[in-house]
Image: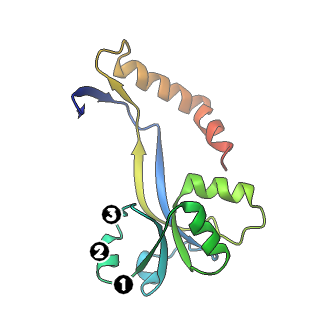
């Protein structure tokens, strides 16, 4: 693969980033279609590929905010019924806002594997990087890092 003129190599996934729709109620077991007709808080300039069709067809109404924090505030103030947020910022927000009315149980709309890349010419092989990632996963180190945000 290439980034600009630089050749790169990708590792195996380090973790998976999940974008979710959340509200003040538990959305476990619900589907996006169950929210048709609702306004969804989104972050300005972000694209949500799995929802673009619904926004275009006006089955969901998109309301943009400048930041995820603005969307959290709108949801807390009951100015929006739902927002889209990656789970890591959601859990971090909830950890710092113990009295929040936002439910951590939402509808996962997208999952993106997060990988490391190595620029060609760097003295580490993809195999060595993957081995280090696997060791971090097995030892629980990655979970310990994310625990700070949950």
Residue ID for mark 1: 59
Task: Tell me the residue at 50%/76% (across/down).
Answer: 30
Coordinates of residue 32 in the picture (x, y in percent): 43, 76
Instruction: Work out whether residue 65 can be spotted.
Output: yes
Coordinates of residue 99 in the picture (x, y in percent): 78, 67
Q: CA distance from mark 1 to mark 3?
A: 15 Å
Task: Tell me the residue at 57%/80% (across/down).
Answer: 81
**Which residue of the protein is positioned furthest toward the top in this rendering?**
123
Task: Tell me the residue at 65%/53% (across/down).
Answer: 92
Q: Is residue 71 left or right of residue 97?
A: left
**Which residue of the protein is positioned furthest toward the bottom in this rendering?**
37
Q: Secondary structure at mark 2?
A: helix
Q: Is residue 122 left or right of residue 133?
A: left
The reply to whether the C-beta atoms of the residues labelled 2 and 1 are less than 8 Å apart is no
Which of disc 3 and disc 1 is earlier in sequence? 3
Q: Which mark is residue 49?
A: 3
Q: Secondary structure at mark 3?
A: loop
């Amino acid at each position: 693969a290439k980034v600009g003129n630089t050749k790169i190599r990708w590792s195996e996934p380090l973790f998976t980033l999940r974008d979710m729709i959340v509200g003040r109620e538990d959305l476990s077991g619900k589907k996006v279609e169950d929210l048709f007709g609702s306004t969804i808080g989104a972050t300005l300039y972000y694209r949500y590929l799995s929802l673009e069709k619904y926004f275009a067809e006006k089955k969901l109404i998109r309301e943009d905010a400048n930041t995820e924090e603005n969307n959290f505030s709108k949801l807390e103030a009951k100015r929006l019924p739902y927002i889209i947020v990656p789970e890591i910022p959601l859990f971090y927000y909830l950890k710092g806002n113990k009295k929040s009315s936002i439910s951590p149980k939402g509808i996962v709309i997208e999952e993106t594997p997060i990988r490391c890349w190595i620029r060609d010419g760097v003295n580490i092989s993809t195999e060595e990087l993957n081995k280090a990632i696997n060791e971090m996963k097995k030892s629980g180190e990655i979970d310990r890092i994310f625990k700070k945000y949950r």
